[in-house]
Image: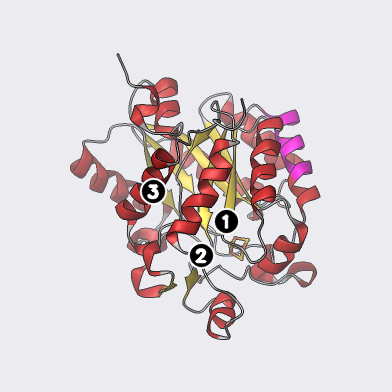
């Protein structure tokens, strides 16, 4: 018998992939755009305070290469290392829906031509959703798999202002409604914990609202400080203190215990892939230890995904 949730106290996204695709699926992160409304300063927007020059994505040596070469290079690397055979191409860096729809379309189709590529994953912002883009996502969904990951970060407008996201939570709700109403794509939300003045009650409410919105999956991040970001200035001016791993684990526990067991979870923390650029907290560079600390906290506290909902 297959152990529920692979023995984890939460419902990992790998369970969805195996159920949907019948085997393990590996993500290929690619970068094809190099800007977003914030970085362009549209309507007075500023760069999000945590975002570095890589657009909040893992830096890859391949990122400056044409899309086909990025895919080939990464496939060869993980194919050799893990025996990977099925892939999702993850258009991750910056804001992928900010580019012209025709260019996005060409990139999607180009990605899907590669052997073993079973779909695309798109990272974007709630205020970058156009009718043409929704039509494109649905078009691709009808022949392949599309997952959209929306950077909600928080539903608290004061926190969104602090992060300089340039959108409010009403826009996030509107984007979710449009994506759900006009497409059948898989929809995920990104949340960020460890923000100043964040309360346990609001973290709990984020989970409950996520359940009500019938979101398919979530990805959790800890607000961490990278070199050459606006947040770095706040950190050195003692205006921002990152939370400890213990505190972050507690916050994740609150969120997951109120999250429906049916919602898949990508990951529990953002880990700095660019170690040389991480300013704080130092625990954000220890992938396995961070994950294990959260799991141990949940086990010791008898917390499971959805356990506070009964
Ligand atoms: S986090 Fe995303 S939206 Fe914000 S500045 Fe970076 S790329 Fe732009």
| Displayed quadrant of residue 231 | bottom right
Mark 2 and mark 1 lie on one chain; the one further toward the N terminus is 1
Ligand 1 near label 2 (Cβ, under 8 Å)? Answer: no
x, y percent for residue 39: 64, 70
Which residues lie in the magenta part?
A: 173-183
Identify the residue shown where x is 52% and y is 47%.
Answer: 252
Q: Is label 2 in contact with label 1 (beta carbons under 8 Å)?
A: yes
Location of the N terminus by quadrant is: top left
Circle 3 sits on which residue?
68
The CA span between labels 2 and 1 is 9 Å
Identify the residue shown where x is 58% and y is 48%.
Answer: 190
Magenta stretch: dominant secondary structure = helix
Of tags 3 and 1, the one toward the viewer is 1
Circle 2 sits on which residue?
243
Circle 1 sits on which residue?
193
Location of the C terminus by quadrant is: top right
């Amino acid at each position: 018998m297959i152990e529920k949730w692979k023995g984890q106290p939460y419902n990992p996204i790998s369970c969805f992939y195996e159920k949907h695709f019948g085997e393990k699926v590996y993500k290929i992160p690619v970068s094809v755009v190099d800007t977003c409304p914030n970085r362009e300063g549209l309507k007075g927007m500023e760069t999000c305070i945590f975002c570095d020059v890589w657009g909040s994505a893992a830096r890859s040596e391949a990122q400056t290469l044409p899309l086909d070469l990025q895919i080939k290079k990464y496939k060869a690397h993980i194919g050799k290392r893990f025996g990977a055979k099925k892939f999702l191409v993850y258009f991750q860096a910056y804001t992928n829906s900010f580019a012209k729809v025709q260019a996005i379309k060409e990139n999607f189709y180009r990605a899907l031509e590669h052997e073993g590529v079973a779909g695309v994953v798109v990272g974007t912002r709630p205020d970058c959703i156009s009718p043409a883009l929704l039509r494109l996502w649905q078009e691709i969904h009808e022949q392949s798999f599309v997952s959209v990951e929306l950077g909600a970060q928080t539903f608290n407008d004061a926190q969104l202002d602090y992060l300089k996201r340039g959108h409010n939570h009403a826009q996030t709700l509107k984007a979710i409604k449009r994506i759900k109403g006009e497409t059948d794509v898989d929809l995920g939300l990104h949340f960020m914990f460890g923000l100043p003045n964040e309360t346990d009650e609001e973290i709990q409410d984020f989970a409950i609202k996520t359940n009500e919105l019938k979101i398919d999956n979530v990805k959790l991040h800890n607000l961490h400080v990278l070199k050459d970001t606006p947040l770095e200035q706040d950190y050195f001016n003692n205006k921002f203190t990152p939370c400890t791993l213990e505190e972050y684990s507690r916050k994740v526990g609150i969120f997951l215990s109120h999250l429906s067991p049916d919602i898949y979870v990508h990951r529990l923390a953002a880990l700095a892939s660019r170690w040389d650029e991480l300013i704080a907290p130092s625990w954000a560079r220890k992938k396995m230890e961070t994950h294990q600390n959260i799991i141990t906290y949940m086990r010791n506290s008898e917390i499971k995904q959805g356990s506070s909902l009964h």
